[in-house]
Amino acid sequence: RGVVHVTSASTSAELVDPLAELPKVGAWLTGLLGGLRARIGDPAAPGDPRFSPHGVIAFTGRELVGDAPLPGAEVHLVGPAVAPRAGSSDFPWELLDPSRRLVLVSLGTANADAGGRFLTEAVTALDALGDRVQGVVVDPGRTLGAVPPGVIVREHVPQLDLLARADAVVCHAGHNTVCETLWHGLPLVLAPIRDDQPIVAGQVVEAGAGVRVRFRRVDAARLGAAITTVLDDTGGHRAAAASIGRSLRAAGGRSAAADHLERIAARHAPLPLLPR
């Protein structure tokens, strides 16, 4: 209907072609979009409704997307919208040992039921590294039983506050956790589960800021080796993460997103009526 609109890309996976190696699925999606245009818009229009021609606000950075062309000239990479979060936390800060390196393990809240085995292996790996590593494991589904005294397990954690103190993160490659981790300049161990997570994990590995493990098959020994790799920075992961973090912070986040929205609105504002 010609209404000026802006779309939001909440993950870097939206800005690449995730179906490049799945042509039949790509054709199926193209058919769905064609049917959508026929029902509510212009059947001859070539545009993709995910990417407004007026502007796309993408909460990610070029380092994750890579060198591939963006899906339009009006895609604005603003980095993550990281901001202080309201509310109090009962996290036991006094249990953190400053003499050991802090590793946060989180699979997000949407994977609580699927994460029991992985979190169990993570606890075993962290316990084996306990002379120099302290693990904080997020277990919203209460899947873990008794854990070694050196590992802290909580249903919920103040993630941004912990990231400010952490040395590395083990996660499911969810885009929010990945960007918040990189925003703090921390390397990652990535165990993607579903959705866009394999794509995001691949982008982080390609950028040099982390290593990938297999969520359903990794054991404590392999997970411990991956954690040691990013902590010891044998592959330059920490330097890459720090570089990406500087770029994400410079992108502007929520303020840059608001600036782009204001500019787009001003560019398409109706002309004032002339006095008669």
Image (cartoon, rainbow, N blue to C red):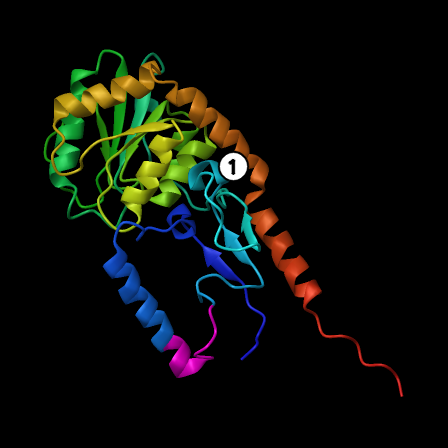
Task: Provide residue 40's location: percent of width, then percent of height.
Answer: 42, 81
The answer to whether 191 is drawn above or below residue 46 in the figure is above
Task: Provide residue 209's location: percent of width, then percent of height.
Answer: 38, 28
Task: Provide residue 33's location: percent of width, then percent of height.
Answer: 36, 70
Seen from the viewer's position, the closer of residues 256 and 126 is 256
Residue at the image point whose x is 36% and y is 40% from the top: 177
Seen from the viewer's position, the closer of residues 229 and 157 is 229
Amino acid type at mark 1: Leu
Seen from the viewer's position, the closer of residues 126 and 15 is 15
Label 1: element kind? helix
The answer to whether 271 is drawn above or below residue 263 in the figure is below
163 displayed left or right of 112: right
Residue at the image point whose x is 46% and y is 77% from the top: 44
- Magenta segment: 36-46
Residue at the image point whose x is 64% and y is 52% from the top: 259
67 displayed left or right of 131: right
Mark 1 residue crowding within 10 angstroms, few (<14) / some (14–19) / many (20+): many
Residue at the image point whose x is 48% and y is 61% from the top: 51
Q: Which residue is mark 1?
A: 248
Quadrant of the image occupied by residue 232: top left
Seen from the viewer's position, the closer of residues 99 and 43 is 43
